[in-house]
Image: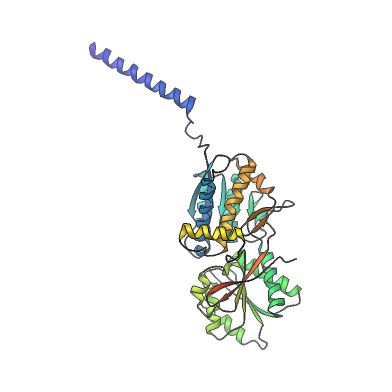
Amino acid sequence: MKKFKFLLSILMILGLMMAGCSSQDNGGEKKAGDGDSNTIKIGAIYNLTGGQASLDQPSLNAFQLAAEEINAAGGINGMQIEVISVDGKSEPATTTSAVQELVDVKKVKVLAGLSDSTFVLASGPIAQKAGIPFITSGATAPEIPDQVGDYMFLSPFGDNIQAFAAADFALNDLQADTVWVLTDTSTDYTLGLAKFFKERYTAKGGKILLEDKYNGASDMDFSAQITKLKNLPEKPKVLFVSAQPDKCGLVVKQLRDLGVDTPVVGGDGYDTPDLVSLGGVPQTNDTYFTTHVSLGNTDAGVTTFVEAYKKKFNKEPENAFAALAYDTMYLIADAVKRAGSDDSTAIRDALQKTEGFKGVTGTISYQDGQRVPLKSVTIMKVNNGEFEFVKEVLPN
């Protein structure tokens, strides 16, 4: 009997303790699953390995840097940013799975990243279906928002704008009225860039002497295409090579090694250290490319970003894609602040109303329902392994 009373007393004490704990949870603490009102989860999908890594690793560095700066300044409406990053591994299927994880498992409120249109088109519909705003910091196909949906935004200009700038530069600055066009057929980016270049170049009076192609997913030897170029009865005055960052240097090197010294023009996929490391010095001399900003610009916004990046990572930003990602984080923070909450739909609506947002890579406005900003294009030249500023233009 004494044992029974003792056990009963113990059970009563435990019951009172549990009741007290339950009362504290309901009255003063958040229930499990309610989330942390002091944190906003922002997903970062970048290809940190594979062919896109030279663009995406600097992008993630800068994206995280911007988040740290915002948090140090007090966060957004009292919320601290938590960046959750997953590696897409430069594989569309893996990128799609990574976005699925960020949306369904990590429960991010906003998604940003990627520097290539093919990967965005593969993974963007997942965020769209879930109602999660997705801002690509580096993909440039202007059709992306319409193809994915109303939760999809671009931080950079579209390929039409940079291709028009490249065509105008070839015709007006290089005085090149004939061109050879070589296109990587394996990606949406390279196909679209070449299409817009040809459209502008021929409309302005330029003549395409030969078009050729290769498969960037597998080809490493471009001697067959270069031989056809060399056998042309009329030699083109400029070469437009629409290539990805892991192949542009190889193409330029093989052109030079086979005796072709004609100026080469390309898009922002050339804005990578891989251009010189794979292409060589001086083989990459007389190569020009369009991009989003010159990191040697003395503008206060550019120099502040460059110095912050150097302080954090002990090196200068590798390319303009880092600056784009930095801008993208601040663009998100601006939208969240204006939305007044971390509700994904409210953030999307605030993004759509963005006007006059000033970043390192230019001013972003989404006007007339568009979700691609109209921004100026920077043209760079490779000289003995260094990228030199040539000019900044806004094609009309």
- Could one spot residue 11 in this view of the protein? yes
Q: Total label count?
A: 0
Instruction: Specify the farthest residue to the left.
Output: 2
Instruction: Specify the farthest residue to the bottom.
Output: 233
Q: Where residue 344 sits: x, y (%)?
A: 60, 43
Q: Tell me which colouring the rendered structure shows.
A: rainbow
Check the image and report above or below for 214 versus 14. Answer: below
- What residue do we see at 51% from left, 76% from top? 279
Q: Where residue 350 sits: x, y (%)?
A: 66, 45
- Could one spot residue 91 in this view of the protein? no
- What residue do we see at 59% from left, 72% from top? 388
Image quarter of residue 347 = top right
Q: Where residue 361 sits: x, y (%)?
A: 62, 60
Q: The N terminus appears in which quarter of the rendering?
A: top left
Q: Is residue 392 left or right of residue 119?
A: right
Q: Which sits in the foreground, 211 or 49?
A: 49
Image quarter of residue 390 = bottom right
Instruction: Specify the farthest residue to the top.
Output: 1
Q: Which sits in the foreground, 43 or 173?
A: 173
Q: The C terminus appears in which quarter of the rendering?
A: bottom right
Q: Is residue 353 left or right of residue 274?
A: right
- What residue do we see at 53% from left, 72% from top? 275
Q: Where residue 377 sits: x, y (%)?
A: 66, 65
Check the image and report above or below for 130 versus 327. Answer: above
- What residue do we see at 61% from left, 44% from top? 336
